[in-house]
Image (spheres, rainbow, N blue to C red):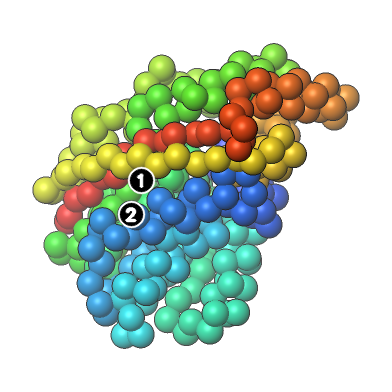
Amino acid sequence: MNKIDIKKVWAGIFTRAAPTYDQVGFKLFFYNFGKQLVELTEIPKKAKVLDVASGRGALLFPALKKVGLQGSVIGIDLAEGMVQKTSEEINKRGFSNAKMMQMDAENLKFQDNTFDIALYGFCIFFFPQYEIALNESYRVLKPYGRIGLSTFYRNAFNEIKWLDDLTEKYLPNNKEMDKQEEEPEVSEFETIEGMQKILIKAGYKDVHNKIEEKEFICENAEEFWKYLWSAGYRGEMERISSENLENFKEELTKNFHKYSFEDGLHWNIKVLFTFGRK
Ligand SMILES: C[S@@+](CC[C@H](N)C(=O)[O-])C[C@H]1O[C@@H](n2cnc3c(N)ncnc32)[C@H](O)[C@@H]1O
């Protein structure tokens, strides 16, 4: 069996997720934390910002507000669908100091010392060689240029663990894919120590963190279903066979009601922000 090109797989998944990304279910989850990461990174006016794995621009648009007309923001993403949708939005809003480019985070097509700020919103765990990605942003940052990243803080998904258990039941055995997804209980991206170590190893200085928490509510089972197709979770959904999907949806709906309150399913999520400088 050919080795799966996991980067291509994710690019395909996110291209198909792009039309509804962040707009259904736990709506504006990414936008909320994107805005917060931009705030906490303290981006100065006139800065040149690189938004790595931009998605639908959860960080790109708030960053544009910070840099003003004399600054600029370049967003890169490997998923064609994300690049297309976010480019459309940039044009619609009339920004001439922002653009999206289809690019691999592990192979940035920019010269050394180009940017003042590099941002990574919920993406580093998708890069198979994330160390290379961090070396790349180090290279393209100017001296004293700063980096800001968001990841999920430890056990962020505990509240909806039942979803993983249910999905597991419906997933076919796929050794090649499972190998790619093998993860320890708590990954290095989920802890302060882990993220500090990663950034320090890539050469960043003054590394520090902040944890923030916010609750999101998904109103009903149909919205939850749509949500699962609208982000990274789509990767698992697409692996469930079409014959099994209907049964899966039925069980999912039952579970949704079991774990929901009157106003819907609550997800209180903790996010770990990590910062450093070149
Ligand atoms: C969970 S989304 C985060 C998007 C955005 N930063 C946000 O906070 O909403 C992850 C993004 O990483 C992108 N991505 C995955 N692998 C990539 C790679 N190797 N290079 C660039 N982008 C990648 C996906 O296409 C997707 O848009």
Say if disc 2 is inside 8 Å of ligand 1: yes
Seen from the viewer's position, the closer of residues 233 and 126 is 233
Q: Is residue 136 left or right of residue 25?
A: left
- Please tell me how crowded label 2 is: few (under 14), some (14-19), or many (20+) other residues with Cα within 10 Å: many
Q: Position of residue 173 (x, y in %)?
A: 69, 15
Say if disc 1 is inside 8 Å of ligand 1: yes
- Which quadrant of the figure contains the N terminus? top right
Seen from the viewer's position, the closer of residues 278 and 88 is 88
Figure disc tally:
2
Q: Is residue 264 above or below residue 251?
A: below
Q: Which residue is mark 1?
A: 150
Q: Going 62% across and 32% down the picture, which residue do you hit?
A: 262
Q: Which residue is mark 2?
A: 37
Q: Going 57% across and 50% down the picture, which residue do you hit?
A: 27
Q: Position of residue 253 (x, y in %)?
A: 74, 27
Residue 81 appears in which quarter of the rendering?
Answer: bottom right
- Which quadrant of the figure contains the C terminus? bottom left
Q: Residue furthest front?
A: 262
| Helix, strand or loop under label 2 | helix
Q: Is residue 75 above or below residue 275?
A: below
- Please tell me how crowded label 1 is: few (under 14), some (14-19), or many (20+) other residues with Cα within 10 Å: many
Q: Position of residue 188 (x, y in %)?
A: 32, 28
Q: Position of residue 229 (x, y in %)?
A: 68, 41
Camera sees residue 160: yes
Name which residue type carries label 1.
Answer: Ser
Name which residue type carries label 2.
Answer: Leu
Q: Could you give the CA–CA distance between mark 2 and mark 1, rounded to whole angstroms?
A: 7 Å
Q: Is residue 162 left or right of residue 96?
A: right
Residue 87 appears in which quarter of the rendering?
Answer: bottom right
Seen from the viewer's position, the closer of residues 3 and 56 is 56
Which label's residue is closer to the chain start, 2 or 1? Answer: 2
